[in-house]
Amino acid sequence: MFGTTKLIKALEEKGVTRRDVLKFCAITASVMSLPAGSVRAMARALEKAQRPSVVWLSFQECTGCTESLTRSHAPTVESLILQSISLDYHHTLQAAAGEAAEAARLEAMKAHHGKYILVVDGAIPLGNPGFSTIAGIDNLSMLKETAKGAAAVIAVGSCAAFGGLPMAQPNPTGSVGVSEVVTDKPVINIPGCPPIPQVIVGLLAYFLTFGKIPELDHLNRPKAWYGETIHDRCYRRPFYDQGLFAETFDDEGAKKGWCLYKLGCRGPTTYNACATLKWNGGVSFPIQSGHGCLGCSEPKFWDGGGFYQTVATPFRPTGRIIAITAVGAAAVGFGVIAANHALKNRAHKAHEPVTVDDLE
Amino acid sequence: MSASFTRAINVLREQVDASVASFFSACTHCGLCSEACLFYTETGDPNYIPIYKLEPFRHLYEQDFTLAGRVKHIFGLSPELTDVALAQWSELVYDSCTLCGRCAMVCPVGNNPGAMVRKLREGMSVAGYAPDSLVDATQRNVHLGSAMGVSYKTLKAQLIHLETDIGLTVPVDVQGADYMLLLSSMEIVQFPEFISAVTRIFHQAGVSWTISSTAFEASNSGIQIGASDIAQQIVERTIKGAQALGVKTVITPECGHSYTALRWEGPTLMGKPLPFKVRHILEVVDQLHQQGRIHFDPNTKDTRPLTYHDPCQIARQGGVIEAPRRLLNAVASDFREMAAHGKMNWCCGGGGGVSAIERADPLRSTVFKKKKQQIEEVGVHTVVSACSNCRMMLEQGIEDNSMDVEVISLTELVADHLVSVEQTVRDVA
């Protein structure tokens, strides 16, 4: 792969017209609430852009994120942009294997030092280096080594962003997300299980256009896509506001498309763009096909109680804490009661009958 | 730290119980009680907000009985309750609270600030911060048997006087009578017509009743000043007098305070049920009327427009609300209700011992505005009540404000409309 080829030229070779690129830029700009002028700027930037060198590391993951980003229903601009980047290392997609593959990674790191983009999917096990290795190199060492010369680190998918499934209780391998390991440079989180393909490509486009990372929220997610909850942008929201809920998956309410809140929908607590960008090229998203949101882009979503329990239902880990707190509070309470009784008894014992002479 | 202050703190600690704990923990500082208090609405002075009157007590409770308070105290984060603070609160605890209990009616969490003021007075009295005039009244109540210093001699003289007036005998020290009537000093001295009225009513109904020469005083200054030990002595005196005569029921007179003092506080002070029933005179008269033992002339109803002032202790604290209205409607044709009446009535401003506190005169006069406004709104020139203390307060306020209003006693009004059965039969014939 050649990092020096112009991106737009590579796209043209794949049959993507200039108009398509402009359209993509317009959509991305509007989703990110960028000013109108930035559409042109973005198109120009993409036109001028060298095919950015990307090193993609996959650790404890299921390849679902790669599937999501590469398998589109029909070839879309974003999938082609993805394919047109200089993906210098991706052990699922690259043809090379073994030492040759690792050599490609080291070469890219050397050639584009300080300029390449590091994309990570999958969590990193801290428990034992042997839990997950690639070509004999453990995940932690590989991440640290590769992150050193990266211009930006993008954690794709909930596992890379927040630990995801590998970190779910009881977290046997001691997994963590990328930002627990890479602390000396910004890590942009694109959580989701998997994340929406447009989001990662949009992020790349923004990065290429402005040379910086977009505004992030407190969990380092780009606000443009993770600024609002699924619930706030859900087309079923009017039913929620009217108190119309599906109680089971086959009742009248479900058939009429009422709100799935009572069936465990995590829409109200999940920040993602599913309700607006949708999936499979804008065809649908889980709620539209009749199932509540699982909250897959939120930290620790596996440990958040049953998927079919209403959001407000308390879940397991609180039980013990509540019990300990209750016992502790009761002990303190009984202590205070005993002390109060003693104080009052002392007061009673010290009581001298009040006579009228005491009143003056 | 003075000895009296140490003793006061000890007494206040004794007063802390479940109700105090739940009250101070539950109070949300919403301030609703302020609008229920006469002293706040008529002055607008935030010092008179009911909950604020309890500040020293709340402070003591927090410091001595709560975990947070104890911790704060250990680290010196909360100032000590001082003798000076108690002294400063004397006016708020005595002059500006009539223990009327109206604040308890509006409290959203069911607290009773009035009852807490009553408890706080226990400490204030021992600390020596009770108003002088209230101390004097309590001393008279204990030493002379009556808060106003009325002796049996005085009573006897009044009885002889009124017996000639009405041609009936007032039974004194009758063994085995059904009812024993208590009297407030105010009635003996200022409103002896009340005794005449009761005598006439009971005569017609054929009630077996008596007055005790040793226990005729109804009021209990020990409760007003906040000294339960003294209050207990006074209740004990009544119990002894009633037991000596073997009466079944003790009647408290037209005095709100003495009804609460004997019926509700009595058993609490003694720590056991009283050996007799306690009824307010209106309850008894109403019952006699319901039983058909007394008769009113339906043709000579009082046609004056009149209203009824509910004494707080009888209506709000005692639940005697229907009886006076039944009686009033039986003898008067134009009874008009004040907007706030029954359990939500406004106090006359002199309850809870406030009428006996001389230094509170100007404040009492200020807060009478509320009653004045109420009387004017209802547009009457006659106010009926059933408490001689209310009656005195109303008369004083009416005079201060040059109002053209007459205050009459309900028992007296009822007695004035009595007709004998023979007379009724004759009239019908």
Image: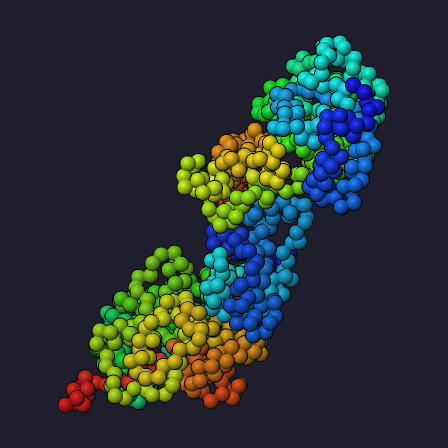
Frontmost residue, A84 versus B56? A84
Query: What scheme was used to colour the molecule?
Result: rainbow
Q: Residue at x 54, y 76 (%)?
A: B367
Residue A35 rendering spot, x and y as whole percentages: 76, 46
Q: Which residue is drawn at 62% across and 33% down?
A: A281
Left or right: where does residue A299 sit relative to residue B109? right
Residue B417 rendering spot, x and y as whole percentages: 28, 85
Q: In this view, does B395 lie above or below A179?
A: below
Q: Quadrant of residue B257?
A: bottom left
Q: Which residue is drawn at 50% across and 81% down?
A: B372
Q: In this view, does B230 lie above or below A111?
A: below
Frontmost residue, B325 versus A248? A248
Residue B165 rendering spot, x and y as whole percentages: 30, 89
Q: Is residue B310 above or below residue A340?
A: below
Spot the residue most to the left.
B429
Q: Is residue B51 above or below residue A317?
A: below
Decide if residue B332 is in sight here: yes
Residue B355 rendering spot, x and y as whole percentages: 50, 75
Decide if residue B173 is in sight here: no
Frontmost residue, B227 versus B375? B375
Q: Which residue is drawn at 27% across and 68% down?
A: B247
Left or right: where does residue B256 sit relative to residue A25? left
Total labels drawn: 0
> Which corner quadrant holds the C terminus of chain A?
bottom right
Frontmost residue, A21 versus B323? A21
> Which corner quadrant holds the N terminus of chain A?
top right
